[in-house]
Image: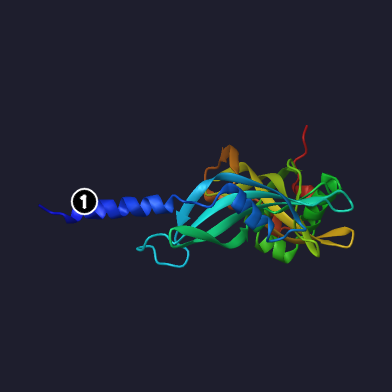
Amino acid sequence: MNLRAPLFFMLSLISLVCFSQYPATNTMINDVKAQNTVEFVTITPIGSWSMFHDKVPNWQQPDACRHEVNIIGKKNVDGSFWTYKALAIYHKVGSGFTFNRLFIIEDATKLNGLNLPDNNYFLKIFMDKLENRDNMFMATNYEMKNATAFYSFEIKETPVVSGTGSSQFVEFVVEVCLDLPNGMQIEKKIVPIKVRAKKIGEEFVFQHALKKNDGKVIEMKEFETSDDVNKLQKYGSSDKTLNDFLIKKE
């Protein structure tokens, strides 16, 4: 009789039971708040605990656990406040866990309640770069450079402010409806461009713009040959203005 299998099962079960002794919720909240007692006002646990490999290779047993939390910061004089998404990380010590660190997810950090300019202000930041055919802007935005026509430019979602108190920036998405060559076709599609502008004084200054995803094709026009498509002028290499490429609504 092979006694190793039952023994291995029992050891694994004991290990699983030990791993299930996660820190108490109040302990975790206090540990998180202790990382910034002035700024962190409300801590809300999200989801459940999970084990992971932090300082050991994957073939060994996980040596740490983590729990996601949402954090609301204190209100500033102007009524604004920061919200954070973070991971409370604990290392396994014996049969328990000891707090190791708080990992702030930077992309999810937002400044709320700040009076921002309207969307037309931010759209103009984007349009200025497009109209002037800014070299870096055109180099990093294939669709803008190769478009044969533009239909519309819209910001549909509220711009998001991120960063720290001394280095704030706003991110917003411009949905561009355009015609784009693709082989023997012209695709009419909507392409979302994510733009970042840095706050300098009371103004926001363009930093960069990158395609958020491949967008959505809403219509296709077939041509007899790819040469017919290639004859169409592309915005990036044309001497014409942006207005000349704009298809106005009837």
Q: Position of residue 90 (x, y in %)?
A: 53, 59
How many other residues sit within 10 Å of disc 1, few (<14), some (14-19) or many (≥20)?
A: few
The residue that appears at 74% across and 48% down in the rendered structure is 245
The residue that appears at 66% across and 51% down in the rendered structure is 147
Of the 4 image quadrants, the one containing the C terminus is: top right
Q: Position of residue 244 (x, y in %)?
A: 78, 48
Q: Position of residue 152 (x, y in %)?
A: 74, 42
Compared with 210, 135 (above or below) is below
According to the picture, the residue beneath numbered tag 1 turns out to be: 6
Describe residue 30's horizontal placement relative to residue 4 as left or right: right
Q: Nearer the viewer, residue 28 or 63?
A: 28
The reply to whether residue 222 is in sight is yes
Amino acid carrying label 1: it is Pro
Q: Position of residue 101 (x, y in %)?
A: 59, 63
The residue that appears at 55% across and 51% down in the rendered structure is 67
Compared with 57, 104 (above or below) is above
